[in-house]
Amino acid sequence: MMRRLSATVWKTLSPFWGEEYKVHLPPNFHSVSFYVMDEDALSRDDVIGKVCLTRIVLAEYPKGFNGWLNLSEIDPDEEVQGEIHLKIEIFGSDLSRKLRCIVCEARDLARKDRNGASDPFVRVQYNGKIQDSMVVKKSCYPRWNEVFEFDLDESFNEKLTIEVWDWDLVSKNDFLGKVMINLNGLQQDLQEEGWFRLSPGKSKANVDEGNLGSLQLQVRLRDETVLPSDYYKPLVQLLCQEVKASHKEKSGHLITLIDETTSAECRQEVAANLVKIFFGQGLAKEFLDLLFRLELDKTNEPNTLFRSNSLASKSMESFLKVAGTQYLHSVVGPTINRIFEEKKYIELDPSKVEIKEAGCTGLHRIQTESEIILQSAQHLQSYLTELLIAIAKSVKICPVTIRATFRQLYRRVEERFPENKHMNVKFIAVTSFLCLRFFSPAIMSPKLFHLREKHADARTSRTLLLLAKAIQNVGNMDAPASRAKESWMAPLQPTIQQGVSQLKEFIIKLIDIEEKEELDLQKALNLQHLTVKEGQLMVYKTKCKGYLLTSSFKKLFLSLTVDALSFAKTQFSKKSSFILLSRIRALEKVEEKSFGNSNVMQIIYTDESGSQEALYLQCKCVNELNQWLSALRKVCVNNSDMLGSYHPGVYKGEKWSCCHQKDKGVAGCDKTRHEVTLQEWNDLLNPDLEAQLIFRHLVGVRELMREKYLELTQDDSSSKSHLPIEHARKDSTTQLFQILKDLEAAHDSFLADSPNFADQEKKYLLEM
């Protein structure tokens, strides 16, 4: 089970979050629940209500669900989780047959007690008779191995019911879930064994339905069944050939077809996947250059260049997020952090100035409106100046692929609009992406760009918005239209005008990179280990002997690359130790009761001698825990010999705290969940998944592409000079349609020949 917390919106009954999450889920997931909580600083958070969407419900909306859902009251009998291992058999003579139910163990039961565990026992009911198992204290992974026998009802009308309860000495026992088994299937096989998912009890009528408020959700569940790489090679190779050919022959028929048949609704997703495919093939710059040329050919008015949400604009946005997230954090991060820490009241718009928010000056005199605006302008000038200086100094830390791509953009625009009256257009083309679509959105919503863990409060949000407007004005090269639109931004005008000059100088230096220098820088970059994630965590490594102590955790700086996880005292210290990713066998959460903290994960790995060891990482919050867990699982996705089970507890006091088994080397009591990950912008490339998503999109717009192809063919047939273009277009388009047809057939054939594929490899992506 993966938990994810949104930011807290304070003091409101109508909160807005605007947060997006993408979670990869295993094929056996059952439901997704959204809990609305009331955060309390001193006591436990209160649950206001919840919305639960089962996989069956999500499947009814293939294009996604978007709407309001009423919050329902929490019913303890419905808050169940986990599975129970049962063996059921019929035995005896024909005259007197019996039903035997062996209750072996359970895993991942709900935590009902304050100690972070439960005291579970089993109640077996059949044909009016009830039998109880023993109580296993303080465990959500109990092992009973108890046998229950009943006289068999030969009519097979009676169901066998197994209920799991949390035993309480003083209060009422808590319900943990149940399994109801129809015995008709046992008439032939006479026995059945396996893990059964615990189901909730009978739901009660919800008297508060609609009275607890409602939650607006946009949710889509997608089947992400991905085939082996060889199946996608023809498609990827054809797309790459198109981009390479267009660079030489000024064509690009397939990309043009994709551009003109992709709707605004799915343009962002298509752009992101295409960018990742070409990025992985080393052709991102060439792909974007082709889109620049296509966009410029359609543009007559320079003021509208790259201002629409075209495939070119969306692709460039995605490219900056994929290639420039660390660069963004380095440039914008310090100023954002300073604004959050200082929490100053800043307002330039006279109609929005609130005297009470600004406080008092010396001698308790309330500030006037003009004083507040003057002081606000000074603070904003300080922030803007700091940010502009950071941008101006960032040439050397800007990724080489971004610099080379902006160089191409600058040159293409300069060729298209060479007139003196359009001298600023080539600069604005660069800043329209760098400032308006990258820096400015990150400033306004730092949490969405992982610059902060929580949303800003109302005061800080206003400051961020004003700073973002200022950066937009600088990016627009201080256009008269921007000044006229919000005249109250005038106090910042001197800083903005100075920023325009600084930004022009920065762009000239940014694009001053030749082909040879680009190749040399890229080669040097490739020799370095790609840092996937880094940060400070509390770390504890198990010893072969002795007890686990929470005081043994040490604060260390962790750095995760594509090869290893390394540790150091500080970010700039020499690495003290490391774990090769190839040695990792499992990455899982740890039970809260083990360390008295619910935000601990474990890394199970083998040392040089082949012995299995565990390393525990304590995170600040559940979101940080999930981010580290996801990042580690993704870089270990191709590891062989990953464990199928693990212990969610710790080995302490000569036994495992989770299942109470005494053998330290015994197999784990819970199944591993390697496939459950979050999808982030800075994820490593996944060529097969990206190719599958593009394949699925192209199949969906195939008929539209045929129609558009015929239109283009008819337009070109009137001119003999276009015959070579027509032939090239026909060849590439025919080839694409054949590849899609072959890939569809291969997809069906592969699934038919691999009956276990759906169970083993099928994955779901939940977008929220």
Image: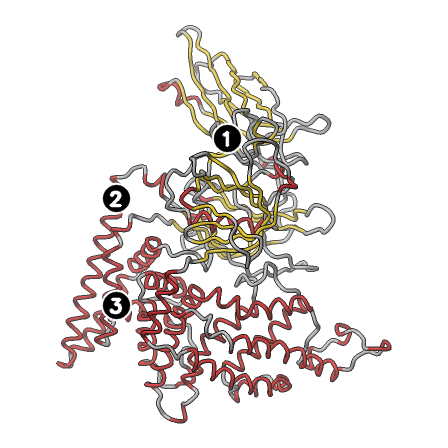
Which is nearer the N-term, disc 3 or disc 2? Answer: 3
Seen in the picture, residue 645 relative to 499 is either above or below; the reply is above
Q: Which residue is mark 3?
A: 254
Q: Secondary structure at mark 2?
A: helix
Up-down relation of residue 390 to residue 337 (above or below): below
Q: Position of residue 333 (x, y in %)?
A: 56, 67
Mark 1 residue type? Cys
**Sequence-first disc among 1 and 2:** 1
Q: Which residue is mark 2?
A: 750
Which of the 4 image quarters holds residue 530? bottom left
Q: Position of residue 83 (x, y in %)?
A: 50, 32
Report the label total: 3
Look at 33% across and 85% down and name the residue there.
Answer: 416
Which residue appears at 50% of the width and 14% of the height? 149
What residue lies at 54% left-to-right and 34% top-to-bottom? 108
Residue identified by numbered label 1? 669
Mark 2 neighbour density, 10 Å: few (under 14) some (14–19) many (20 or more):
some
